[in-house]
Amino acid sequence: MHICRWYCISISLFLLFGTLPEFCSAKSFPAIAVLSQIKGKVKAGPAKKMVEGTNGLLLRYRQRVRTEKEGRATVFFKDGSEIRLFADTVLTVGARKTHNSRWARYRLILRSGSFWGHFVRGKNHVEISGGSMRLQLSDASIRFTKKKTRNDIAVTSGTVKVFNKSSFVKLQRGQRLYQIQKNDFMPQKVSMIPNELKLWIEPSEPVFSGTKPIELKLNMQVVRSGSDRKVERPGPVFLKGNYYNLDIPDSIRLNTDGNAAVRIKVDPPSQEDRTFEGSVTFHAIMDHSAFDDVRDGKVRVKLGSL
């Protein structure tokens, strides 16, 4: 039931930030995000006083999150953006702004490791630094990996501006930079993300019968981008949906053929619910750092009623 927990945390965060007086500054309440959906060992807090991370822990400006081996966690930001941290990753949230980033909404630093992130549209862009790379983005989704001497960036939606020591490039949806060094001329290094995670639902047109739940079968398969050619890529998957009455397994893994089938229970909305629009969108990402070559999977299913 991690989807229900996601909504509870999101609502709590909204209420927490939304009920503060407008004059309450970052200095008096320097919280920027909340920690959630933890797997394995995770630490968070000031760089020299990090503590064990817990679901619902508020993250304040210039604090860090560190995932240990096999650890993973999601960071929800107060503007609606989110980041999924993979294993062996260290991220600073709300880092101190530089001269170049003084107009940024907020600034993040990927100190090591890898993450997937979606950043919502805002008046100003979000800036992310990692090694010699600097990213500016708004209303975009990315995978970003920082290695000792090289970096990988993949854009799964939107547009991202990328800077290094010697060049600049705009990455569009479906493009990536692979093993980039600080002095590479990046326009010559742009390539397409070769694979994607394909999703499809059975039954294709599910229908609620009174108060009875619907059981869906969500199929997943890694394929070559733009085709149905199967790719053998086993690995963990992180799945979410934009509807509160979903029961999704906490652990999903593609088999050696690169596919999986997941059973999902969908309860009907309450009679008082005026926000449900009659459909659910499922969004799946590869939940590991080694999948910068696989685009996210999405599928929208319409839920009818008798």
Image (cartoon, helix red, strand yellow):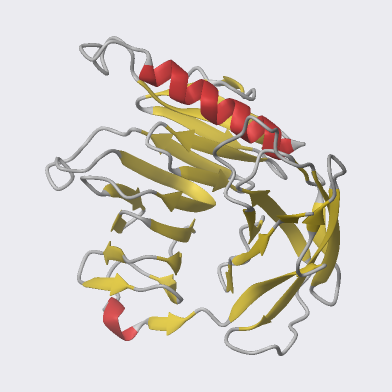
- Quarter occupied by residue 24: top left
Can residue 286 be seen here?
yes
| Rendered location of residue 264, percent (x, y) | 82, 51
The spot of residue 112 in percent (x, y) is: 49, 48
The reply, left or right, for residue 114 in relation to residue 284 is: left
Q: Residue at x 28, y 81 (%)?
A: 187
- The residue lying toward the viewer, choosing from 276 and 195, is 276
14 up-or-down from 178: above or below: above
| Residue 46 can be seen, yes or no | no
- Count of numbered badges drawn on the protein: 0
Q: Nearer the viewer, residue 62 or 245?
A: 245
Which of 82 and 218 lies nearest the eye of the viewer?
A: 218
Above or below residue 251? Residue 144 is below
Q: Residue at x 75, y 85 (%)?
A: 230
Image point (46%, 52%), residue name: 118
Residue under the image location 53 percent in, 21 percent down: 12
Q: Residue furthest front?
A: 306
Quadrant assignment, res 36: top right
Left or right of 115 on screen, residue 286: right
Q: Residue 126: image x %, image y %?
A: 29, 47
Which quarter of the image is occupied by the N terminus?
A: top right
Q: Quadrant of the C terminus?
A: bottom right
**In the displayed structure image, the side of residue 276 where residue 137 appears, left or right:** left
Q: Residue 192: where, in percent of width, then height?
A: 46, 83
Q: Considering only vertical position in the picture, is 87 above or below 294?
A: above
Q: Is residue 201 left or right of residue 104?
A: right
